[in-house]
Amino acid sequence: MHPVSGSSGAGRLTGEQVLLRDTIAKLASERIAPRAAEIDRTGEFPEDIRRLLAEHDVLALPFPVAHGGVGGDLLTICLAIEQIARACATSSLILIVQELGALPLLIAGSPEQQARWFPDLASGRTLAAFALTEPEAGSDVASIRTRAVRDGDDYLISGTKRFITHGSVAGLITVFAVTDPGAERHGRLSCFVVEVPTEGFRVARLEHKMGIRGSPTAELTFDGVRVPAANRIGPEGDGFAIAMGTLDRSRPGVAAQAVGIAQGALDAATAYARERRQFGREIGEFQMIQAMLADMDAQTEAARQLLYTACGVIDAGGPDVARWSAMCKLVAGDTAMRVTTDAVQVFGGYGYIDEFPVERMMRDAKITQLYEGTQQVQRLVIARALIGRDRG
Amino acid sequence: MHIVVLTKPVPDPAAAAERLGPDGRLDRAASPAVVNANDEYALEAALKLTETLGGDVTLLTMAPPGATDTMRKALAMGAARGILVTDPALAGSCTQSTMRVLAAALRAQSFDLVLAGADTSDGGGGVVPAGIAALLGLPYLSNAARIEPDPTAGRVRVRRITPTGYDVLDAPMPALIVCTQALGEPRYPSLKGIMAARGKEIAPRSLADIGVPADTVGGAVATSVLLGSRRPPARGATRVVRGTPTEGAAEIVALLEERRLLG
Ligand SMILES: Cc1cc2nc3c(=O)[nH]c(=O)nc-3n(C[C@H](O)[C@H](O)[C@H](O)COP(=O)(O)OP(=O)(O)OC[C@H]3O[C@@H](n4cnc5c(N)ncnc54)[C@H](O)[C@@H]3O)c2cc1C
């Protein structure tokens, strides 16, 4: 099978993007796909895949050339995520979260801050994480309780962050905390770079999960963690805006992960339909199987094209960015769930056992409907853009 | 060390869409092009040599103008520049035209080594490198499994694979070496390499530029004509054996025994 199945993105990709996508597709099918089942089974963070992605400059994609990055635009980053996720959703998170954790710095970091942290992030020497969610603040971001209290030239951060991807393996965490409890909802938060390990910081627990099992999801506690004021990203009170701006740019990454998972499941189901025989013929000759495969293909392609368009709109900037970002994740996440569920159906009972990859893909797909805002929250964002109320 | 690597764009074998047009020539629109796989092994060998000994790698390609897209991938792997010999008069060239044109293009270059792949996946003649070496009077070192240049002595040593082992050949440089896959797997282009490839030069050369009269090459003077191309008859059904290597091996042995193929 050709390493890049599914759309060519015909007409809208540059020669470089095609070459980059095909290179990553080859890397993913030769070096990552053979590891995917084991990563899922052991639930261990794949250090080898992190090194592989770093060696091939994949983790450098989101960072500017001036700081050792590749300077990829959003579509290029998403092409890479899609191809990795087609082989292994856990592995694709290594790139997704490297970008997610660094986005506050990319959006609002000072030139000094960027020069200080980007080279190590771009080389993959340091992994990043993004710490917004708390036990009492999930969809309702503005109700964060973690405090950052000014102490001379420093801040002291205290509180608990939950469900932080790579929280246990990252060396740099962008943490959102309340600096002004008296301010109106959106002016309460600020964003800080916390370099770990550091005194008062602890990984309190790791979650056992349904899918993306090799990606550690950590609960982090901050007990008076001292952070210099130079680590604050943007002015005090800008935290909420930085968080929303980050999610506007990072949700397409989750959409790309979802499209990749869907394509991986479609590839597996198509191959199986040609191989498995019942009633004296290949199951792919049954029209009911054909219809399922055709729907899976059409839906995956539709999600992909919406994503690619969204990337262009978001890179161009403008008032409609939040809507496009939410739309592409909404459609791609639901597509991944539907397509992987149908892929299991095409496999019959064999789809339900771990000898074949589609049950893993179905478990992995579910997370794309949950993180970086649940599907309900995506609908809220879209509806607010339509009806014109302020969000949050 | 200055190394020229001969690189040919061929239809992507993975796309399996290679076909001939009505004129008996390759229908280039039918299939995406890639760098000929054996040429990538030659390029990898050249890149490793220049990484340890210094110098750089130049690609030499004879192809239609669209070949620049394919050459970018080879540039992304680390070659410094490319030369693309392209001319409408070259359409339908046979291997004799090809070797004369590439030899003429090489005359204008200074190099220590020319590296070529064993053969191409679309043509498969495998004689072009030998023809070039003959035309230029270069030592011809084929089936190379190891290449050890000694730049100060101006000589190169090559392990040539033989049916029973290998020969060790020694020759003065410049020389032409035909590479095998034993030299090592080609690298993936790094993403930075892909981005950097944009800024590298691919110099176009016409027949006039390299001093080859247009009426001495191309389809009109081809020494052979391709009449058609056929696929071998389809093989029987394939049985895929799954499981761990141990289980798989046991199952294959059982299958062979069942068919009385094991003594
Ligand atoms: C594996 C994993 C990795 C994660 N990684 C990170 C990370 O790296 N960094 C980070 O900060 N967070 C991370 N998260 C957190 C994730 O973004 C949140 O779980 C998500 O935003 C939902 O919050 P919640 O779990 O508290 O659900 P809740 O907000 O409690 O939602 C429960 C249900 O109520 C619905 N709901 C809530 N509010 C509304 C509303 N206003 N209207 C309609 N429906 C509503 C939701 O859609 C959902 O169905 C991760 C989560 C998981 C599971």
Image: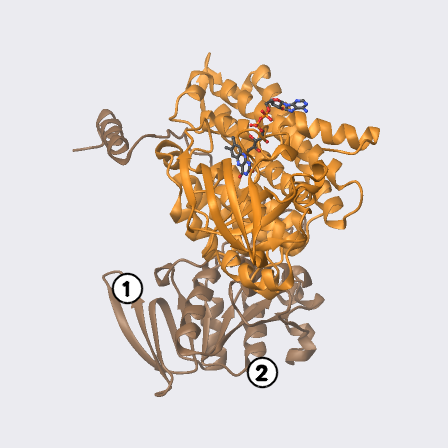
What residue sits 64% from the left and 60% below the top? A110
Q: Quadrant of the C terminus of chain B?
A: top left
Q: Determine whether, in the image, residue B198 is placed left or right of residue B5.
A: right
Residue A318 x/y as whole percent = 80, 46
Q: Do labels 2 and 1 share a chain?
A: yes
Q: Colour of chain B?
A: brown
Which chain is indicated by disc 2? Answer: B
Q: In which quarter of the image is the N terminus of chain B?
A: bottom left
For badge 1, the amino acid type reads: Thr
Query: Is residue A314 among the parts visible in the rendering?
Result: yes
Task: Work out whether B5 lies above or below A382.
Answer: below
Residue A64 x/y as whole percent = 62, 60
Nearer to me, A172 or B93 = A172
Residue that extends furthest to the bottom in the rendered view of this protein: B153
Task: Work out whether B91 lies above or below A287.
Answer: below
Task: Work out whether A274 lies above or below A279.
Answer: below
What residue sits 44% from the left and 49% below the top? A50
Determine whether the residue tagged by mark 1 lies in a helix, strand or loop: loop
Residue wearing tag 2:
B108
Q: In which quarter of the image is residue A295?
A: top right
For badge 2, the amino acid type reads: Ala
Residue wearing tag 1:
B162
Nearer to me, B41 or B225 = B41
- Which numbered marker is on residue A68? none
